[in-house]
Image (cartoon, helix red, strand yellow):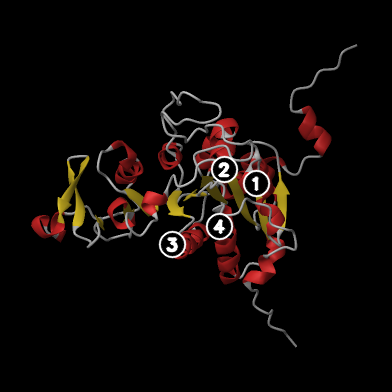
Amino acid sequence: MSTVAEKLTAKDFASSAEVKWCPGCGDYSILKQVQTVFPDFDIPREKVVFVSGIGCSSRFPYYMETYGLHSIHGRAFAVASGVKAVNPELSVWVVTGDGDALSIGGNHFIHLMRRNFDLNVMLFNNQIYGLTKGQYSPTSEKGQVTKSTPYGSLEDPFNPAELAIGARASFVARTLDRDPKHMQAMIKRAQEHKGASFLEIYQNCPVFNDGTFFVYTDRETKKEHSLFLEHGKPLIFGESDDKGIRLDGLKPVVVNVADAGQDDLWIHDEKDKTLASLLARFHDFEGMPRPFGVIYSENRATYEAEMSAQLDRVEGQKGRLPLDKILSGEKTWEIH
């Protein structure tokens, strides 16, 4: 007689560990949304692994009642790749911050994107180093005054979405800690994607960089500064949805919807890499709203699938070799 497994709830994904983040930290919201949506995936908890590096966000694995690994600074991508390579049936999630991922972990990040392991990256971007008490990070705005840049940062920041697309990421999306429903939808889209999914989450640090993204979440300013993307829908924003975006060649231009007409507006196509690259670079154009949602999605072979096929092919040609033969290689010498 077969028994039907009882459906898991959000509480089933919450560990007994005391959550230790500063009051008001955006990480609380992210944790809540992850625990809320995971029961919908119908994945057994023993098939889920969260891997983190170092930073405030990297305490995440302690709070999920799944397998988890708190690795070392910037190396979560390499560790997660190894986990997925030898256990491709696992659902692997990387939790990282803008400093952990894009400074010491920058090299690992770009290579994970191009390799396209079927795993999910959630980057908590608060544009500051929070754990080490307020130094500027790779995403801090130019001119930002921090403990390590008392006269203002001289560096142009990384744009994580632009960097991911440039590194050949197959899925790039952006969401916000103060928009729970949107974040849940983006986590689900990331899970559904077959390949490396990159989800940038704007996350508030109330202690060292408070309010840096509030213009995109506060009721008074949100509609004028935020653009929520939907595949196949025109790019429209504004307090009364009266503003649209059209393309003048490859330059985005804000227009009045009533004057331009819907047919003249930019229609979002998340499969179009050229336009996705332009969307990710809206930072560079004055007066453009900030896009949220799925910026780019592409279907291509995953690394672990191609690796498995290659191993089968070589084994078919050479048979299963003993380990000492593999280690010694095909060319050996004896010294007398």
Residue located beneath label 3 in the image: 182
User: Which amino acid is tagged 4?
Assistant: Ile
User: Which amino acid is tagged 2?
Assistant: Gly
| Label 4 Cα neighbours within 10 Å, binned few <14 / some 14-19 / many ≥20 | many
User: Which amino acid is tagged 1?
Assistant: Ser
SS at mark 4? helix
Q: Earlier in the sequence, mark 1 or mark 4?
A: 4
Would residue 256 appear left or right of 325 to someone viewing this image? left
Residue located beneath label 1 in the image: 58
**1 over 21 or under it: above or below:** below
Would residue 267 appear left or right of 109 to someone viewing this image? left
Task: Check the image and name the residue furthest to the left.
Answer: 259
* Residue 297 is at least partly visible in this image: no
| Contact check, label 1 and label 2, Cβ < 8 Å | yes
For this rendering, which residue is in front, 224 or 83? Answer: 224
Quadrant position of residue 55 = top right
Q: Quadrant of the C terminus?
A: top right
**325 over 298 or under it: above or below:** above
In 3D space, how far apart are the residues under numbered discs 1 and 4 (Cα atoms)?
12 Å
**238 over 3 or under it: above or below:** above
Q: Quadrant of the N terminus?
A: bottom right
Q: Earlier in the sequence, mark 1 or mark 3?
A: 1
Residue located beneath label 2 in the image: 97
Task: Check the image and name the residue furthest to the top.
Answer: 336
Would residue 263 appear left or right of 276 to someone viewing this image? left
**14 over 320 or under it: above or below:** below
Q: Which mark is residue 30?
A: 4
Where residue 278 sits: x, y (%)?
30, 41
User: Which amino acid is tagged 3?
Assistant: His
| Contact check, label 2 and label 4, Cβ < 8 Å | no
For this rendering, which residue is in front, 292 or 22? Answer: 22
| Label 2 Cα neighbours within 10 Å, binned few <14 / some 14-19 / many ≥20 | many
